[in-house]
């Protein structure tokens, strides 16, 4: 992935996180295993994916096993956003809050080595 695409993906993810924080009235509180907390102190992990990549493939949300376990242990939530680039920013097309115990079956595999854990890719259409 080129630096330009990687930089854009990071910027788009940040914009989607801000959207989710506003929509679900969360305070951004980033640490290794969650991105925000609600007014009751419950941790939330915010996940964003482009609805469709330039090659036509649908986007996926990446979850990490170690962080998912901590979120479940703390009765945490996920907020998902599917977006498309729009002008210089994004347009969130769909969003949804899901309790960490209510996700579809996750198939953990390698690929999360940079975070010292396994990862699962969750298709957008399984969340929405």
Image (tube, rainbow, N blue to C red):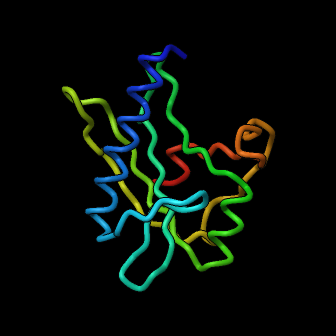
Can you say whether 121 is above or below 26 in the image? above
Q: Would you say 21 lies left or right of 127 here? A: left
Q: Can you name the residue that lies furthest to the bottom here?
A: 40
- Picture quadrant where residue 113 is located: top right
**What x and y, as percent, mark residue 73?**
68, 77
Please report the residue visible at 52 percent of the width from the left and 25 percent of the height from the top. 57
Q: Quadrant of the C terminus?
A: bottom left
**What x and y, as percent, mark residue 124?**
50, 44
Q: Would you say 55 lies left or right of 87 here? A: right
Front residue of 53 and 125: 53
Please report the residue visible at 44 percent of the width from the left and 60 percent of the height from the top. 79
Q: Would you say 119 lies left or right of 124 here? A: right
**What x and y, as percent, mark residue 12?**
36, 36
Please report the residue visible at 36 percent of the width from the left and 82 percent of the height from the top. 39
**What x and y, as percent, mark residue 68?**
66, 62
Q: Can you name the residue that lies furthest to the left here?
A: 87
- Picture quadrant where residue 24 is located: bottom left
Please report the residue visible at 27 percent of the width from the left and 36 percent of the height from the top. 90
Can you say whether 125 is above or below 30 in the image? above
Q: Quadrant of the N terminus?
A: top right
């Amino acid at each position: 992935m080129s630096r330009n695409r990687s930089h854009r993906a990071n910027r788009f993810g940040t914009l989607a996180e801000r959207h989710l924080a506003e929509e679900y009235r969360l305070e951004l509180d980033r640490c290794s295993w969650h991105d925000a907390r609600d007014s009751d102190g419950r941790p939330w992990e915010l996940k964003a994916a482009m609805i469709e990549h330039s090659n036509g493939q649908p986007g996926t949300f990446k979850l990490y096993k170690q962080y998912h376990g901590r979120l479940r242990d703390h009765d945490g939530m996920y907020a998902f956003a599917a977006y498309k680039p729009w002008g210089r920013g994004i347009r969130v097309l769909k969003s949804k809050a899901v309790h960490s115990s209510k996700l579809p079956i996750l198939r953990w595999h390698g690929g999360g080595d940079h975070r010292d854990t396994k990862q699962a890719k969750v298709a957008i259409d399984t969340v929405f």
